Amino acid sequence: MSAAATIAPSAPFAAEPSQPIEREKQHLPPKTYADATENPPDNVNRLENTPPTQFVGKGEADTQRSPPFSSPRHKKSGSLRLNGASRQGKPRELIVEDIQDKSGERLTSLKLAFDDKPKPQRTQTELVSGRRAGASWERSHIHFAPISVPFQRRLQTLMVLAHTLSIAIFLTAFFLLCAIPLFWPLLFPYTIYVLLSAAPYSGTLAHRSTLLRSLPLWSLFASYFPARLHRSEKLEPTRKYIFGYHPHGIISHGAFAAFATEACGFSTLFPGITNTLLTLDSNFRVPFYRDYALAMGLASVSRESCENLLSKGGPNGEGMGRAITIVVGGARESLDAQPRSHLRLVLKRRKGFVKLAIRTGADLVPVLAFGENELYEQVTSDSHPLVHKFQLMVKKCMGFTIPLFHARGVFNYDVGLMPYRKPLNIVVGRPIKVVQSRKGEMVDEGYVDEIHAAYVRELERIWEEWKDTFGVGKGVELRIVE
């Protein structure tokens, strides 16, 4: 059988044969495979600067082939034989090439042509990814309170939460008891008593509890903000007073802390004076809550209640040493309670409290609470005029309004009905002496305007003197409106 071997590029082999039989005929020692690879024939092109030399053939030369190496291990393996034939007898191509490593040493290798085929490379394709889970929470504007909050701060939050939801809590308790028929014989007469009772405006303060007002729990309430009471000068306990509290804010937390409890030390700053915080008469028609409010020393803001409080009781039985606190701006002023904005006081046409002072002979004491409007955010009238008109309509029909407000929550700092922790500094101004009018005599309007103007001037003095001390922002002004 003729050989079908091809060498490219073509060149004769060296005189020294490489086949074992030929070397034996010429009495030459067998040549090892290592010698063949280390000392290839001189006429074989090395792959220094040229493509590798390829040997193509079927392994069927005229010369007798070397006997195969009969190792059991190689018989079981799938490796190729050195003569270029596969286990299945398929012809292969052989390549001899030189390789230079990084150190400069040259190596010669012999490999089958199928090893030279390029391996498939991984291609980088463009991927379109969806949204990453949890990314919106990382960008959230809601900041949650850490777990490691001091226990005292948790108690402060609990007390403010209880006060904020006090009406809802007592009203819910009442309806739950109404669902139990066993309590009906008690609840029915109690409801009639609540509707007909004159305790909120009788002026006797018979339900007032000094112990309840002095509980240490109220110190937790006041220290939440914190709230602090300041006086400009001492007040004589032999006279009676009307404290005008400004501004109303959303819920008037400062007024409650300073004048409904002893958390801020009212009796220490003003000894001998019994003060009563006034609120809406409708609050005393809420079952259970009205008893709680009366025990805290609250009373109705009606004209009858104010006159009774300032003309009854005291050492002389005519109200000496008595005082009432009125949030003059009322529900209308609560709609202007905007943080970081001008302090708008609804006061221009509010002169009823001045007439009350003239009739009862009580001195007027302006009170300005720095920080009261900073406790909540609320919808502005400029951005939502229709909502503002609806709020005014509710106020006109029902006597109170519903501000759309929010602040922080119990477990977060951005959403909820809890007030922000902003300092409250309640400054009590200097008293404005008032001459009492004769009983049954009409109040002089000129004198009313004079006292009213003096009252406004004292408020402005408090503002100008203490606004920088208590952290009012630059450009914020005090404005007297309506």
Image: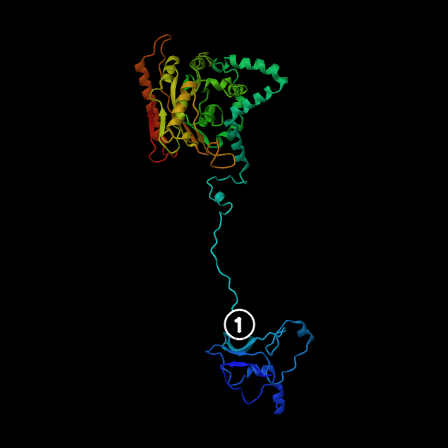
Depth check: give the residue in front, 262 or 401.
Answer: 401
Q: Residues within 10 Å of mark 1 (few under 14, many from 20)?
A: few
Residue at (53, 85) in percent of width and height: 41
Depth check: give the residue in front, 338 or 155.
Answer: 338
Residue projecting furthest to the front: 1
Residue projecting furthest to the top: 440
Quarter assignment of residue 36: bottom right
Which residue is tagged 1?
116
Quarter assignment of residue 56: bottom right
Residue 380 vertical position relative to residue 177 in the rendered view, above or below: below
Q: Determine if residue 400 is in view.
A: yes
Depth check: give the residue in front, 455 or 282.
Answer: 282
Depth check: give the residue in front, 475 or 366.
Answer: 475
Residue projecting furthest to the bottom: 26
Q: Secondary structure at mark 1?
A: helix
Residue 314 vertical position relative to residue 233 in the rendered view, above or below: above
Residue 14's spot in the image, x, y percent? Answer: 54, 88
Residue at (58, 88) in percent of width and height: 17
Give the position of the C terminus as an image quadrant: top left
Residue 350's spot in the image, x, y percent? Answer: 36, 19
Residue 40's spot in the image, x, y percent? Answer: 54, 83
Residue at (40, 32) in percent of width and height: 339
Residue projecting furthest to the left: 446
Give the left or right position of residue 405, taking residue 463 as reference.
right
